[in-house]
Amino acid sequence: MEHLQRLLVFVALVWCAACGNHNHIPDGAKANRILVYKSAHTMMLLNGTVVLKTYKIAIGRSPVGPKTQLGDHKTPEGNYTIDAKKSASRFYRALHISYPNLADRQHAERNGVDPGGDVEIHGIQNGLSWMGSLHRTIDWTDGCVAVTDDEIDEIWRVVDVGTPIEIRP
């Protein structure tokens, strides 16, 4: 299964690089899983083994390693769910990720730190949407996954609350 997943990711990344990111997810399609690869700066929306779309992303400004505490500017790594949709945010639309999970909370407790929270997939900060895809030239978030405003509109449409998200290094 691991080999199949790696092949799937490779094909999706090659396809994304070759074709750009202009494909449209068909009306009525739904993602039943989200897969993020921090090191490749990509996020894939999947329905079963079918990749609906791959996005280039910006992540936390300290990109290596998992989030372990409030203020570390890291994007978490592990298995979570989309637990809320936020239309009122300092960013243009946001899908809230269920970080911290039990393992994250236990790790933080053992180390005497606050694990943090409020990790999201979101668009660009309000008032800065003119940046478009330029925002991806650096990792700039406090630990979130950032896409363009047009992309978060599409993601908002096809991702429901309860959708699992796996964030890999």
Image (cartoon, rainbow, N blue to C red):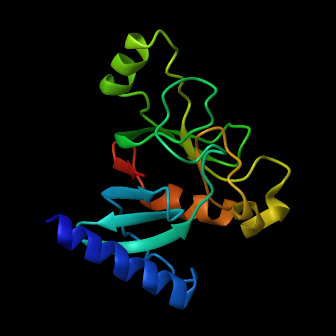
Locate residue 23 relative to residue 81 in the image: left or right.
Answer: right
> Front-most of 71 and 84?
71
Q: Position of residue 109 (x, y in %)?
A: 40, 11
Give coordinates of residue 60: x percent, y percent: 62, 45
Q: Is residue 71 above or below residue 97?
A: above
- Identified at 36% across, 69% down, the residue is 29
Q: How many marks?
A: 0
Residue appearing at x 71%, y 48% in the figure: 140
At horizontal 51% and vertical 60% (from top left) the residue drawn is 155
Looking at this view, name the residue that lies furthest to the left: 1
Image-based side of 130 in relation to 96, left or right: right
Q: The N terminus is located in which quarter?
A: bottom left
**x and y, in percent, of residue 3 in the image:** 19, 71
Left or right, residue 118 beside residue 48: right
| Nearer to the camera, 142 or 120 | 142
Q: Looking at this view, is 72 or 88 the one in front?
A: 72
User: Which x, y percent locates residue 42?
Assistant: 50, 65
Q: Quadrant of residue 34?
A: bottom left
Q: Work out whether 8 lies above or below 103.
A: below
